[in-house]
Image (spheres, rainbow, N blue to C red):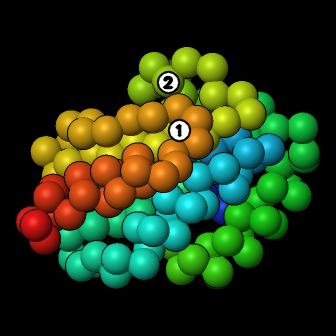
Amino acid sequence: NVQVRDAENNPAKIPNLGNKVLSVFYNDADAADLNDPLADALKAKKFNEAKYQGIGIANLKDSKAPNFIIRKIVRGKIEKYKSTILTDPDLILAKAWKLGNCNNTSVVIIIGKDRKVKYVKKGAVRGAEIKKVVDIVDVLIGAK
């Protein structure tokens, strides 16, 4: 678990790592909406919050927009989705988790309670792949 920043630029770690099944959306701020269809599908499932949490992490380093503007947008998304969105000003997570070049893209990572990565994809998740990810989360939390 690495230390990134919250929407107010305070130090923060990824919450519930090892305690819940997590879906982590690591998004370049310039591609922040790329995997919203998947985020919406996961949100629609209304998974048990005691077992599952969705988290967004904004990659600020690769964005053209100033960090203070991105953080304002992040605060709006936190309100809209009622979820946790952190910020990464220096590619801390990308380097620590060896995600490679994350410029202009989104990386989706599903992590089990055992802290092991169960799914990872860089780029847009669409169509049948959305159902596959939702099913993975279903199985991991014991809903299926």
Out of 33 and 60, give the one closest to the viewer.
Answer: 33
Report the residue at 70% width, 40% height from top.
28
How far across and how far down the image is residue 99, in percent?
50, 24
Q: Does 100 appear above or below 30?
A: above
Quadrant placement of the N terminus: top left
How far across and how far down the image is residue 22, in percent?
32, 55
User: What is the C-alpha distance between the residues marked 1 and 2?
Assistant: 8 Å
Report the residue at 20% width, 48% height from top.
112
Viewer can see residue 7: yes
Q: Does 120 appear above or below 108?
A: above
Viewer can see residue 16: no
Residue 142 lies left or right of residue 15; in this view the side is left
Q: Quadrant of residue 140?
A: bottom left
Report the residue at 13% width, 71% height from top.
143
How far across and how far down the image is residue 125, in percent?
51, 46
Report the residue at 57% width, 77% height from top.
81
Q: Quadrant of residue 114?
A: top left
Of pointers 1 and 2, the one earlier in the residue sequence: 2
Residue 104 lies left or right of residue 131; in this view the side is right
Bin the neighbour count of mark 2 within 10 Å (Cα to Cα): few under 14, some 14-19, many 20 and up.
Answer: some
Residue at image mark 1: 107
Q: Does 96 appear above or below 52?
A: above
Q: Secondary structure at mark 1?
A: strand
Q: Secondary structure at mark 2?
A: loop
Bin the neighbour count of mark 1 within 10 Å (Cα to Cα): few under 14, some 14-19, many 20 and up.
Answer: many
Amino acid type of the residue that numbered disc 1 sits on in the rendered structure:
Val
How far across and how far down the image is residue 64, in percent?
90, 38
Residue at image mark 2: 99
The numbered disc on residue 41 is none
Residue 1 lies left or right of residue 92; in this view the side is left
Q: Are marks 1 and 2 in contact (CB under 8 Å)?
A: yes
Amino acid type of the residue that numbered disc 2 sits on in the rendered structure:
Leu
